């Protein structure tokens, strides 16, 4: 199956591990890039970009251009996939965190009628009803449940 991994960039290491395990099971996997172009045209790790983005002001235009590019590029990966897997680990004091970007990606998958797998249970967030309405399949950390 063709699977796109979704989730916070804070979980990039977990995405790499999940990609390896899924590929060993015969799946094709897409995920966010490990590097992006920095403000001076140099390649920087996505972790470094994430840290810069969290600390930057709204006038750092290159940061927001990269953000727009990454949103668009990941929507393309969702469209390519037969299913998405949301890696929703604990973050910011929220068990099973699903952030705004990931919710958008889930919305694209839902619109395109693709299965949405959640690695962990649905978080108790203000938009829990929207998540429930997309009928995600919770796999409780077991990647073998993806079929």
Image: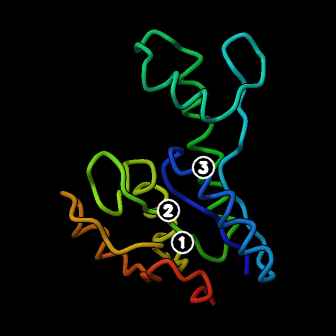
Q: What element carries label 2?
A: helix
**Which residue corresponds to mark 1?**
112
In the rendered image, the residue lying farthest to the left is 126
Front disc: 3 or 2? 3
Residue appearing at x 49%, y 75% in the figure:
116
Q: Are marks 2 and 1 in contact (CB under 8 Å)?
A: yes
Q: Which residue is painted at 50% across and 62% down in the image?
A: 108
Q: How far apart are marks 1 and 3 (CA)?
A: 25 Å
At a point 30% along the width and 61% down the height, the residue shown is 95
Read off the residue under disc 3: 12
- Name the element at disc 1: loop
Give the mark, 1 or 3, whose residue is nearer the N terminus.
3
Residue 64: give x, y in percent of width and height. Answer: 52, 24
When the figure is inspected, residue 68 is found, relative to residue 12, above or below; the finding is: above
Q: Is mark 3 on a helix, strand or loop?
A: helix
State how many labels appear: 3
Give the crowd class for mark 3: few <14, some 14-19, many >=20 residues within 10 Å: many
Badge 2 is on which residue? Answer: 108
Q: Is residue 143 above or below residue 10?
A: below
Here the colouring is rainbow
Question: Which residue shows up at 41% across the image and 13% down it?
Answer: 57
Q: Looking at the image, which is closer to me, 75 or 8?
A: 8
């Amino acid at each position: 199956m063709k699977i796109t991994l979704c989730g916070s960039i804070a979980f990039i290491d977990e995405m790499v591990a999940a990609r390896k395990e899924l590929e060993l099971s015969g799946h094709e996997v897409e995920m966010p890039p490990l590097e992006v172009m920095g403000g001076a045209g140099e390649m920087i790790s996505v972790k470094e970009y994430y840290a810069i983005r969290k600390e930057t002001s709204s006038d750092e235009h290159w940061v927001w251009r990269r953000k727009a590019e990454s949103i668009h590029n990941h929507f393309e990966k969702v469209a390519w996939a037969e299913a998405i897997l949301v890696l929703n680990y604990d973050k910011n004091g929220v068990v099973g965190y699903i952030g705004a970007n990931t919710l958008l990606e889930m919305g694209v998958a839902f619109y395109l009628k693709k299965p949405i797998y959640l690695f962990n249970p649905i978080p108790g967030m203000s938009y829990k009803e929207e998540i429930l309405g997309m009928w995600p399949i919770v796999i409780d950390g077991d990647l073998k449940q993806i079929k």
